[in-house]
Amino acid sequence: MGILNRKSLLQKQKLEIVQVDLGNDEFVFVKEMTGHERDQWEQSLLVEKKDEKGVTSYERSLEDFRAKLAVCTLCDETGELLLEARDCSTLSQNMGAKRLETIINAAQKLNKISEEDKEALVKNSSAGQVDNSSSGSAKN
């Protein structure tokens, strides 16, 4: 195909969609994220903190990590997202860990979220999680 020009670089790319078998004759679809969607998902893992002087900083929060990724990638067969950011906590609380892990393993593979990426998230996560709030920052 050769070198891409501006027009081809800015053209909407067809994103990959895979079917994920959940057992018991049940399945879901998971989609590849755009660069923007990936940035939004990564941003949803940040919690804003202010120190006593009012200086703002951001810390990683792994609260609902799996559900946030699932919300950003679960779709129908055409690639339309099924869930919204506000569904993260409910999904995380109601879906079994095994089923959720199956979904996010597919999402991580499809979106090239490596073990190193996951380790960096854990490493940069604050040791004491923020009160029990879900920062409400998961975006789609």
Image: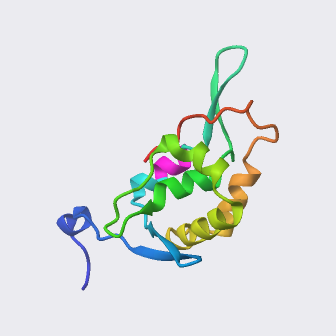
| Overall secondary structure of the magenta section | helix
> Is residue 24 placed above or below 52 in the rendered structure?
below
Depth order, front residue of 65/13: 65
> Is residue 129 placed above or below 37 in the rendered structure?
above
Residue 127: % across, % down: 82, 41
Magenta-drawn stretch contains 115? no
Depth order, front residue of 127/132: 132
Q: Which residue is farthest bottom?
A: 1
Residue drawn at point x = 61 percent, y = 40 percent: 46
Magenta residues (range): 39-43
Residue 3: % across, % down: 26, 78
Picture quadrant where residue 126 is located: top right
Q: Is residue 85 left or right of residue 11?
A: right
Residue 113: % across, % down: 58, 66
Residue drawn at point x = 72 percent, y = 48 percent: 124
Q: Is residue 78 left or right of residue 57?
A: left
How does the figure colour the protein chain or chains? rainbow
